[in-house]
């Protein structure tokens, strides 16, 4: 408790926290609706937050609009310099912020620190990017004409983030958008607002030190209503949302209805294929991290493994041995590998899914209990489960945000495994474990994995920030983070310049007046 108190103090979290911040100023503290934030680790009340009203949201949007007028005129590399300073501050606070992520969300400290590292990495990436926001040049068909394209800032970027990566996914969006010249309005998950407030304090310091206007980075603590306002708001040209497919469809529909842009990063149903040519030891390590890391609450979590007949029994046995000895406990305890689920609702979803899949004919091999006793008083600790199942089972087709691993058998050619892997609605992440080039290349080919992420001899989770992140089908189609994902945060403009004294028309059209 002493440790947590120090962390909260360092990060500026008070007992009661305001509802919104327009960069430099906090507001909305008179709002009557509050939300208590309890740690899923020990059930203690960490702090209380005020929830934003529609009026608060309005205040944020007008301030953001005002800030955009200044920010878009700042040269991109200078915007990069601000993001560099944000990265430096994150380095300073890495330990404290990592601990708060862990304590508020429940992921183990190693993963909490990893999440902050992801933020630092994206800051570095964005700094480099700030000098590389380039378009193409083309040759004009007309003499003494030149064509090129340029990318301009878009305006307000709304970011709706999920509880499972309370800060990293926001930072992928916010840091890229910032160097692109956009201003950001962030609605974090109402389950994890404290880490968001901690980040906002860090940003405020940087904004103040650089005498920048309020409203470049904004935070609104609110419920789904705020998300809905944002989705319908024509003043927000891009809404980037991470969460369930159900939520993403609502956001996508509302943004689409006004012809805005949405960037959706939704559910996954990620599988690892283990062929007869796999290095089983490597596969085992990747499967366990993918299935029980973050207690199965990553969108990239490994939910299915599709294992060749010839190695099925051996892998099953080895998996059961590891699952039997998984250290489950307080996420800040350095020996823990599996922390708690976020809340009781998540626990119910876990136990319901296990019940239903067994009714469909699945066999629960291990796990599935809710732990009780001295160290598990919150009722949020569960034992990760492995279920033998078939791909077409309804529950296997769903994403249950909990540590349930479905064990699926295949025989014959790798194409059979690929068909099973693709045979779900979602399309985020996928992997194959094999040392056979013919198998791995088939998996990566155009008739291979249909996911946004396809890995070889690496698990489904834990992507680096340098690649574009996102997936197909029910996953929503958006791409965030590295590669050229920045383009969605800018508007593209094609320019044709005539440096002759003639006025020729394209396509050779004659139009003499
Ligand atoms: C998410 O779960 O929403 O690839 C993001 C990973 C992490 C990000 C996950 N780098 O598992």
Image (cartoon, rainbow, N blue to C red):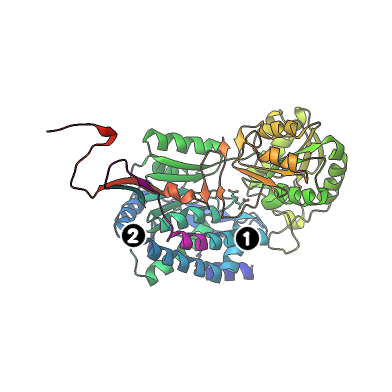
Give me the disc on residue 71: 2
For residue 384, above or below residue 104: above
* Tag 2 secondary structure: helix
- On screen, 368 above or below 425? below
**Quadrant holding the N terminus:** bottom right
Q: Is residue 218 visible?
A: no
What residue is drawn where x is 67% and y is 46%?
455
Is disc 1's CB within 8 Å of ligand 1?
A: yes
Magenta region: 123-144
Q: Looking at the image, is mark 2 or mark 1 earlier in the sequence?
A: 2
Residue 369 or residue 77, whichever sits in front: 77
Left or right: residue 41 versus residue 87 is right
Q: Quadrant of residue 83?
A: bottom left
Q: Residue at x 73, y 49 (%)?
A: 457
Number of other residues with Cα within 10 Å of mark 1, as a class: few under 14, some 14 to 19, many 20 or more: some
Q: Residue furthest left?
A: 513
- How busy is the neighbourhood of tag 2: few (under 14 within 10 Å), some, or many (20 plus)? many
Label 1, secondary structure: give it.
helix
Residue for point 53% across, 71% down = 10
Q: Position of residue 490 (x, y in %)?
A: 39, 49
- Residue at 83%, 53% (x, y): give it: 325
Quickly name the residue at label 1.
Answer: 114
Residue 405 among those drawn in magenta: no
Look at the image and tell me whether residue 25 can be seen: yes
Viewed as shown, does residue 259 lie left or right of 246?
A: left
Place residue 80 in its image quadrant.
Answer: bottom left
Tell me: 222 left or right of 421.
Answer: left
Give x and y (percent) for residue 480.
51, 49
């Amino acid at each position: 408790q002493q440790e947590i108190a120090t962390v909260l103090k360092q990060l500026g979290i008070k007992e009661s926290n305001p509802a919104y911040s327009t960069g430099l100023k906090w507001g909305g503290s008179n709002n009557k609706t509050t939300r208590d934030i309890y740690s899923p680790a020990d059930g203690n009340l960490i702090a209380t937050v005020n929830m934003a009203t529609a009026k608060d949201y309005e205040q944020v949007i007008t301030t953001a609009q005002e800030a955009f007028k200044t920010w878009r005129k700042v040269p991109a590399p200078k915007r990069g310099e601000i993001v560099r300073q944000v990265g430096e501050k994150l380095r300073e606070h890495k330990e404290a912020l990592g601990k708060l992520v862990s304590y508020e969300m429940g992921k183990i400290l190693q993963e909490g620190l990893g999440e902050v590292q992801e933020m630092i990495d994206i800051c570095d990436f964005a700094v480099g990017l700030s000098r590389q926001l380039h378009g193409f040049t083309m040759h004009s068909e007309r003499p003494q004409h030149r064509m090129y394209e340029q990318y301009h800032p878009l305006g307000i970027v709304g970011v709706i983030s999920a509880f499972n990566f309370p800060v990293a996914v926001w930072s992928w969006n916010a840091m890229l958008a910032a160097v692109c010249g956009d201003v950001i309005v962030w609605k974090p998950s109402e389950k994890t607002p404290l880490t968001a407030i901690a980040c906002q304090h860090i940003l405020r310091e940087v904004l103040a030190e650089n005498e920048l206007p309020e409203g470049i980075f904004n935070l609104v603590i609110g419920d789904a209503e705020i998300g809905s306002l944002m989705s319908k708001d024509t003043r927000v040209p891009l809404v980037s949302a991470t969460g369930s497919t159900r939520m993403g469809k609502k956001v996508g529909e509302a943004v689409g209805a006004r012809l805005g842009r949405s960037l959706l990063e939704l559910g996954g149903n990620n599988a690892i294929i283990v062929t007869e040519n796999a290095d089983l030891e490597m596969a085992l390590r990747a499967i366990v991290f993918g299935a029980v890391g973050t207690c199965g609450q990553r969108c990239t979590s490994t939910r299915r493994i599709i294992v060749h007949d010839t190695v099925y029994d051996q892998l099953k046995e080895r998996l059961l041995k590891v699952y039997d000895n998984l250290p489950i406990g307080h996420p800040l305890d350095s020996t823990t590998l599996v922390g708690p689920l976020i809340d009781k609702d998540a626990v119910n979803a876990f136990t319901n899914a296990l019940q239903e899949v067994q009714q469909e004919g699945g066999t629960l091999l291990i796990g599935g209990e809710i732990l009780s006793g001295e160290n598990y008083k919150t009722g949020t600790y569960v034992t990760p489960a492995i279920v033998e199942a078939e791909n077409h089972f309804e529950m296997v087709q769903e994403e249950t945000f909990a540590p349930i691993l479905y064990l699926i058998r295949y025989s014959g050619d790798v194409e059979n495994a690929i068909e099973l892997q693709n045979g779900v609605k979602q399309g985020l992440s996928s992997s194959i474990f094999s040392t056979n080039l013919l198998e791995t290349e088939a998996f990566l080919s155009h008739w291979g994995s249909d996911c946004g992420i396809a890995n070889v001899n690496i698990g489904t989770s834990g992507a680096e920030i340098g690649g574009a992140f996102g997936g197909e089908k029910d996953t929503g189609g958006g791409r965030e983070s590295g590669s050229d994902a920045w383009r969605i945060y800018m508007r593209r403009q094609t320019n044709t310049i005539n440096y002759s004294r003639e006025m020729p028309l394209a396509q050779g059209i004659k139009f003499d007046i």
